[in-house]
Image (cartoon, rainbow, N blue to C red):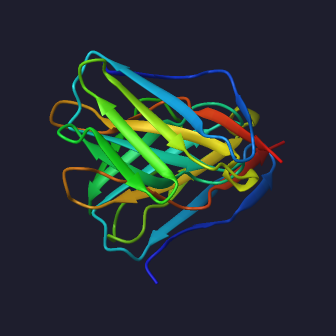
Amino acid sequence: EADIYQTPRYLVIGTGKKITLECSQTMGHDKMYWYQQDPGMELHLIHYSYGVNSTEKGDLSSESTVSRIRTEHFPLTLESARPSHTSQYLCASSDRGPVETQYFGPGTRLLVL
Amino acid sequence: SQKIEQNSEALNIQEGKTATLTCNYTNYSPAYLQWYRQDPGRGPVFLLLIRENEKEKRKERLKVTFDTTLKQSLFHITASQPADSATYLCAILSAGNNRKLIWGLGTSLAVNP
């Protein structure tokens, strides 16, 4: 079954640690996205990719980085986690069509102590 | 820039009634408008898409209207159930070359038994 996966679902980590949030999709979608969302707040696009070796920064400035070496995989990395990075991170993908309907993973809830 | 406004106040209704949520947009005439459902701690789930040349779209108990003159979409849930309680977001595709989805903040719906 085609789907989009995120791991870990929950992560508690100390300040200064390097973390990588994983996102994989089996739908063969070219476009992938990372959003940041705090409880009750709006979705903020932080990174997106239109295909392999393509990455762009989103509307919200983020200290994280992303890579797109394979179509199905779009990991997000924080080199040095800080308490201000505490949030929920949502990965999504969409196909090449004109509509851009997005399919979301279950999210990673990150807590930096 | 393109902007979306949704009812900021939570909507509380009794089970069995029709819920109506509003999405207004400015500075743009999108070709498509999408509605998503988001449950707490989860990613949004696509529900319905309506095109600019469609006045109305239905899917089971859901109905979406699209008034391009008023720059407004209405989202209706008929015969509402407590399981319909969630946040509902509308989204439009931005203009220009690097098109991205622009998201509303969402309206929280609570259906009381």
Camera sees residue A64: no
Q: x and y percent of residue B6 in the render?
A: 52, 24
Residue A36 location (% of width, % of height): 57, 40
Quarter occupied by residue A96: bottom left
Q: As drawn, is B66 to the left or to the right of B90?
A: left
Residue A4 visible here: yes
Q: How many marks?
A: 0
Report x, y in % for residue A35: 51, 44
Left or right for A112, reference B90: right
Is A57 left or right of B94, judged from the image as shown?
A: right
Residue B36 horizontal/vertical position (percent)? 49, 47
- Residue A17 vs B74, above or below: the answer is below
Residue nearest the observer in this picture, B3 or A51: B3
**B58 vs B95: above or below:** below
Viewer-nearest residue: B93 or A88: B93
Image quarter where the N terminus of chain B lies is top left
**Front position in the image: B83 or A8:** B83
Query: Toward which corner of the image does residue A57 lie, by quadrant?
Result: top left
Q: Identify the residue shown where x is 31% and y is 73%.
A: A28
* Residue sticking out furthest to the bottom: A1
Residue at horizontal 38 percent and vertical 72 percent from the top: A72
* Residue at figure coordinates x 60%, y 40% from the top left: B18
